Image (cartoon, grey):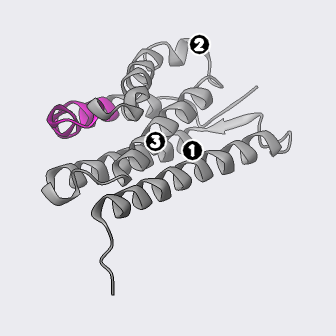
């Protein structure tokens, strides 16, 4: 039996990761734009905290892949980074439901993270500095965002 070319296997895995990421974005957008009027006019604090939790879990998964030398070239890093970026985009969109006075301190932190994670499509993004940032700076940033969201009212409506 012929052996699979290593580059072909990596390309196949990368294609699968991109397909997965694109499918998740399409599914999210479909749910967002097809939601009924009652679904799209309110957001709960717990919903925002769940988004923060999911972002932290994706960051944790990325960190685990980056510290494993065999997995440092994994195309699934891109998929996880895409999920983190989408999480911040979703968080930003939903935080805007709350009063301006409540969100003025959390929006700059979310925007800073959105700006950082927007570079996930660049190969230079996946460096040793990313692993260090995932270990030190990003958990404290997520903790700050979560703490500020915990101070929000239970629900906000448009």
Question: Residue 133: within the magenta?
Answer: yes
Give the Cα separation between the discs numbered 3 and 2: 28 Å
Circles 1 and 2: CB atoms closer than 8 Å: no
Mark 3 or 1: the one toward you: 3
Residue 53 visible, this orientation: no
| Count of marks placed on residues | 3
Task: Count neighbours of disc 1 (C-alpha within 10 A) and say few if under 14, some if 14 to 19, many if 20 or more.
Answer: some
Q: Which residues are magenta?
A: 125-142
Callout 2 secondary element = helix
Label 3 close to label 1 by CB (< 8 Å): no
- Residue picked out by circle 1: 47
Tell whether 116 sits left or right of 130: right
Q: What residue would you read off at disc 3?
A: 82
Residue 78 position (above or below residue 125): below
Q: Position of residue 93 (x, y in %)?
A: 61, 28
Per the rendering, the mark at residue 126 is none
Q: Residue at x 21, y 51 (%)?
A: 72
- Residue at left 62%, top 23%? 98
């Amino acid at each position: 039996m012929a052996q699979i070319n290593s580059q072909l296997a990596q390309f196949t895995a990368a294609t699968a990761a991109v397909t997965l990421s694109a499918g998740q974005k399409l599914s999210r957008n479909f749910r967002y734009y097809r939601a009924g009027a009652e679904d799209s006019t309110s957001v709960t604090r717990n919903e925002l905290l769940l988004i923060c939790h999911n972002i932290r879990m994706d960051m944790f998964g990325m960190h685990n892949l980056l510290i494993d030398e065999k997995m440092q070239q994994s195309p699934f890093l891109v998929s996880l980074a895409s999920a983190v970026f989408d999480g911040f985009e979703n968080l930003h969109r939903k935080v805007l439901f709350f009063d301006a006075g409540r969100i003025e301190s959390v929006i700059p932190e979310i925007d800073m993270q959105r700006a950082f994670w927007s570079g996930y499509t660049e190969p230079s993004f996946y460096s040793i500095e990313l692993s260090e940032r995932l270990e030190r700076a990003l958990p404290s940033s997520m903790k700050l965002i979560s703490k500020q969201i915990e101070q929000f009212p239970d629900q906000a409506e448009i």
